[in-house]
Image (spheres, rainbow, N blue to C red):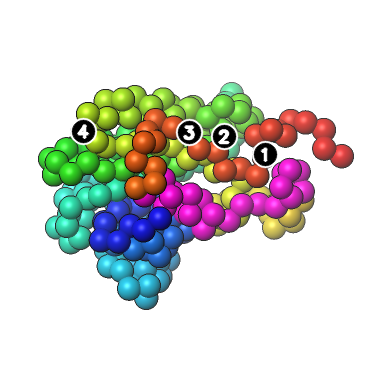
Amino acid sequence: MTLEGRSILVTGASQGIGRGCAIQLAQAGANVGINYRSHPEAAEEVAAEVRAIGRKAVLLPCDVSDAAAVEKMFKDFVGDLGPLNGAVSNAAYSDREAMVTADMAGFERTINVTMWGAFHCVRTAAQTMIKQGNGGSIVVIGSPHAVIPVPSSMAYNMAKAAIDHMTRTAAIELAPERIRVNVVHPGWIDTPGERKFFSEEELAEGAKSIPWGRLGQPEEIGRLVTFVMGDACDYMTGSTLLMDGGISLAFGSDRD
């Protein structure tokens, strides 16, 4: 799983799954671009941790829903860390409200960040890699929401379903350029973002409904992403990898 000497950009890397990916990639030898829109102090902490591992880190503030800003971000990344070898599209946003009463500003923000943000990152990463001519690997962080119609999450469900198909289409288009594109579906992961929707007590109780009996940890997703980024997965593209403790198997079932 060595990524020695490679440079990889991670969006939404100030906390949660993005943070887990950034640190695990650094531990495997990669220099890391740390994108964030909010939580600058947390992003600085991630950069400090990457540097403490002995890798280079660059902070890249950017709203991924802004295509022009994403293009500038990748240019800044290459200027600081050299050729782009990989990208992890992780940044997302979600409001939860029933479709018929949803605040459309939040609904559209969810689509703009989660779907269009992923598209901007995949497209710009691919353009950068094609220009370099050195191939590369792109991993998109998807969700079981792509296939499970979780209530009060229509915008997020729609966006995650769209980026699944985006990933597969990008994979077939970019195969001649030796650019691999895969999607990872995390399950219920113990991240700060979950506190937007659940109390600590609700998270603890919800974890009991997962077949594996606990929430996942960001570093576990980071280790999977690191593996997919590596040469051991050279023959893998257009794949969907599920790491969810079995929650997709049990969703909606009676688990007394």
- Residue assigned mark 3: 240
Q: Is residue 18 visible?
A: no
* Image location (x, y in percent) of residue 109: 42, 37
Can you identify the residue that label 4 sits on? 177
Contact, mark 2 vs mark 1 (Cβ under 8 Å): yes
Choose the circle earlier in sequence order: 1 or 3: 3
**For the residues marked 2 and 3, what is the alpha-carbon distance in whole angstroms?**
10 Å
Task: Measure the alpha-carbon separation of dots 1 and 3.
Answer: 16 Å
- Horizontal and vertical percent for residue 246? 67, 40
If you read the primary sequence from the N terminus, does the residue marked by circle 2 or circle 3 appear first? Answer: 2
Q: Quadrant of the N terminus?
A: bottom left
Q: Earlier in the sequence, mark 1 or mark 4?
A: 4
C-alpha gap between disc 1 and disc 4:
36 Å
Q: Is residue 111 magenta?
A: no
Q: Are marks 4 and 2 in contact (CB under 8 Å)?
A: no
The label number, if any, that marks residue 144 in the structure image: 2
> What amino acid type is highlighted by mark number 4?
Glu
Q: Residues within 10 Å of mark 1 (few under 14, many from 20)?
A: many
Say whether disc 2 or disc 1 marks the residue closer to the N-terminus.
2
Q: Could you classify mark 2 by the number of other residues whose Cα lies within 10 Å: few (under 14), some (14-19), or many (20 or more)?
A: many
**Label 4 to label 2, Cα distance in Å?**
29 Å
Q: Which contiguous range is marked in magenta?
A: 206-230
Q: Amino acid at mark 1?
A: Ile
Judged from the image, the secondary structure of the residue bearing numbered disc 4 is helix
Rendered image quadrant of residue 130: top left
